[in-house]
Image: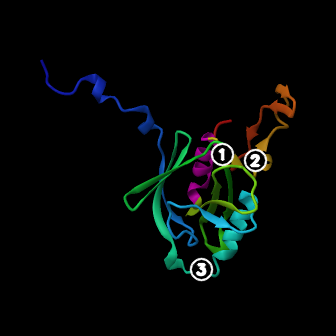
Amino acid sequence: MALGPSRQFQKRRPEFESRSGFAVTFHPLHSQVSKAVTQKGCRSARQFVKAAEEALDSLCVQDQRMAMIEISSGLFRILAYGAETAVPLLEAEISYVVEPKQRKDEVLFGLIPSIVKRADVSGWLFLCPLILKDEVLTLLSKSGCLRDDFRSAVDQKQLPEVLGTGGFGQVTRGIWKTGSGGGTP
């Protein structure tokens, strides 16, 4: 009889199998990566990212903070300096800018945890390599984020099938356009 852990303990827990982690650089506006940044006068993720892009000129590159992020199980986890912050992604709003302010091969993402419209939105801003854009967008989409570029990233004309109707509109099937980072529809 062989000694060792039983099969029950040899199996990996599903929550760890679905995690995806990335090393990212947080925008210099973050004094602490565990806390959201507020942008005055911004009411959407798109405005949030555009304002942050403009601020890149005036902020010191040395003020950037590196951290690990994990996107899984409907959460955006920030792992930095021995601490973890978890941000729910269901109905969070996401926007991005490719190669902001001449930063070659980078993408600036803006994540607002809820789509509640306020005078000043708060969220997280991070830069990652351009090669990871589609993968990050796919994970965020699958975790429940609402993309500000949804209408341009999904082709609804190829599949005009109506799945259902309601008081506010119709539900139709769509196909992610090539290069939109949408993953599997």
Look at mark 3 in the image and give the residue it sits on. 59
Q: How many marks?
A: 3
Distance from label 3 to label 1 (Cα)? Answer: 28 Å
| Residue occupied by mark 2 | 150
User: Residue at point 56% right, 41% down?
Assistant: 74
Q: Relative to 179, is 160 on the left or the right?
A: right
Mark 3 or mark 2, whichever is nearer to me: 3
Where's the C terminus, which quadrant? Answer: top right
Quarter of the image where the N terminus is located: top left
Which residue appears at 36% of the width and 32% of the height? 12
Q: Which residue is drawn at 66% across and 75% down?
A: 55
Three-letter residue code for mark 3: Leu
Magenta highlight on residue 140: yes
Residue on which disc 1 sits = 145
- Label 1 secondary element: loop
Residue 173 is situated, as x and y percent measured from the top left of the image, at 78, 32
Tell me the amino acid under the disc marked 1.
Cys
Give the residue furthest to the left: 1
Q: Is mark 2 on a helix, strand or loop?
A: helix
User: Within 10 angstroms of label 1, few (less than 14), some, or many (20 or more) residues?
Assistant: many
- Tell me if residue 1 is in the magenta stretch: no
Which image quadrant for residue 108?
bottom right
**Separation of disc 2 and disc 1 at Cα?**
10 Å
Is 81 left or right of 121, judged from the image as shown? left
Part of the protein shown in magenta: 131-143
Along the horizontal axis of the image, is 47 left or right of 26? right
Name above or below for residue 58 compared with residue 12: below
Gap in angstroms between the C-alphas marked 3 and 2: 31 Å
For label 2, count other residues whose C-alpha is less than 10 Å away and answer few (under 14), some (14-19) or many (20+).
few
| Main SS, magenta residues | helix
